[in-house]
Image: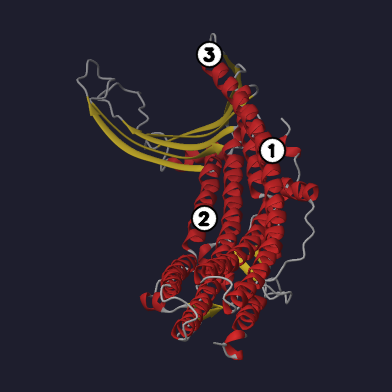
Amino acid sequence: MKIDDRERRFPRRAAAAALLALTPFWSGAALATGESARVTVPIESGKRQAQPLPEGERIELSLSQAIELALRNALDLDVASLNYQRSGFGIGAASGIFDPIVSADVNAARRETPTTSSFQAPASESQRFELGIGGLTELGTEYSLGLTGLRSDSPTQTTIPGYVEINPTFSSGLTASVTQPLLRGFGRDVNTRLVVQSRLSRDSSAWDFVASVQTAVQLVENAYWDLVYALANLDSKKEALERAIDFNRITKIKIDVGALAPIEIVQTEVTIAQREQEIILAEGQIGDAQDRLKRLLNVTDLSAWNRPIVPTDKPSEEKVEIDVEAGIRSALEVRPEVKQALVAIESRKISLVYNRNELKPRLDARGTYGLAGVGFNNDAVKEGSSYSDAFSQIGSWDYPNWSVGLNFSVPLRNRTAKANAAIAATDLELANTNLALLKQNLALEVRTAARNVDTARRSVAAAKKARELADRNLDAERKKFDNGMTTSFTVAQVQNDLTTARSNELLAIAGYLKSMVSWHKAIGDLLPTKNVELAGLPDSMSTYATEEGARP
């Protein structure tokens, strides 16, 4: 019996539907790569304001919105920010060794002793105070300035005529001292090493933050396209189920009119069951993709986990010229891993300078200069004398005193310093070696990323061609079936081939998009490509723009 014209046209309508389904998914309308608003990401976590999800039953997101939400809300970036802030505190801690130290000491004492002479006081009392300030300079100079005062009261029991006893007495002193290392411990490079290394550690943490932002952008975009693929794949599976159901209907008609054996219906029902199973699996993939993206967006509201994310961007082929050599140069210039390696080299250099300085003998120049004064309070000598007389004499420079000298010392064999210097030299060589290895790995990464882009681009073209041929093959096989020249089993196999081809095409497109993200991350321009700008980075990060710091 002749099948009606509407039923005969189904293969062509199915092919057209497949083509229309893929057209918005892979178009030249630059929706995925279009210009988006610039996103500024401050390095300090307290300056990043959390951004809520769009309202509504569904969360409609463009790719740029998803990236911005992740960079505003991601806890992973907060971890990197807090590590940066923590390393910044180390600069203050290391600089603290140059903070002046103010000291004060006040004490009083009384002592009673048995006497053996009338000139010996049976009891004595004293009150003493000392004020001082001292510290260390970046050249290694140790300085101190101290002011002392002492009141001593020790009356004797002598009654010898004409004997004058000065009691109590008041003494004062002002002393300045300086110790300057001339060999070991001399120089700004030696004494500020902890401060400089703390700054380098902070810069390394800042580059960690840059790398974290790049990783966050890559993960979000990959998750976004995975979700787009999962949704398109579900649509593809649903269309495959519709084809299977329609073919089952046509097969029943042919059986009813006696054109086919009843056994032929079994294969069509098997195909329907397979398509239904594929739909279940595709729905599970959507749920997984939704959850991964929501995790990256740091969704904390439990109700939001039940709201589906609806991607609004459609994939488009990014017109980018893949220049491997230029990509490698870019990676070696701007990748945060390279900057961190250069920072590590600079830190190792500083350690080597310090440890080589420790090999030198100790030769310190010391100098002190002081002024002294004395006052007393005794009615027989002077009325009303006290500390004022002692301090007055200091102000008059009546009793100066000074001393200068050199102190030299050298440890025999000095094995500790020699071993530490050898370790520091090895660490520097290791850091340079690590940089060389990193360059090789980055070159390999760029080459691999470029190859993956090329492979993915060609895979898309091949998958598209395979899907078009599968469409035509199904059309031809359905015509054969209508004319009794093939079986339902063969038609079901061809339908399976088309379903597989469509899934492969969708997967190839998603793979291409993710390969482009990997390419931009590999060459180091992912953030400017996605209009992401970092704010609050330390100015010192710009000093690692070249490889000059890598040379020992």
Q: Which of marks 1 and 3 is in front?
A: 1
- Packing grade of label 1 (10 A; few <14, some 14-19, many >=20) is some
Disc 3 residue type (three-letter): Arg
- In the image, 312: left or right of 274? right
Q: Which colour scheme is used?
A: secondary structure
Residue that extends furthest to the top in the rendered view of this protein: 412
Q: Nearer the viewer, residue 373 or 118?
A: 373
For disc 2, the marked residue is 80
Q: Residue 36, image x and y in percent?
A: 68, 75
Image point (59%, 76%), residue name: 478
Q: Name the residue under label 3.
A: 415
Residue that numbered label 1 is attached to = 440
Q: What element carries label 2?
A: helix
Residue 79 numbered mark, or none:
none
- Circles 1 and 2, Cβ within 8 Å, touching? The answer is no
User: Label 1 to label 3, Cα distance in Å?
Assistant: 37 Å
Q: Which of 131 and 9 is in front in this view?
A: 9
Of mark 1 and mark 2, the one earlier in the sequence is: 2
Considering the numbered disc 3 on the image, is that residue within a helix, a strand or a loop? helix
Per the image, label 1 sits on a secondary structure element best described as: helix
Residue 525 at x, y percent in the picture: 71, 58
How far across and down, in percent of the image, does residue 98 sit?
A: 56, 41
Looking at marks 1 and 3 on the same chain, the residue that comes earlier in the sequence is marked by 3
**Residue 30, image x and y in percent?**
72, 74
Mark 2: few, some, or many residues within 10 Å (few <14, many ≥20)? many
Mark 3: few, some, or many residues within 10 Å (few <14, many ≥20)? few
Residue 5, by quadrant, is bottom right
Choose top left, top right, bottom left or bottom right for residue 141.
top right
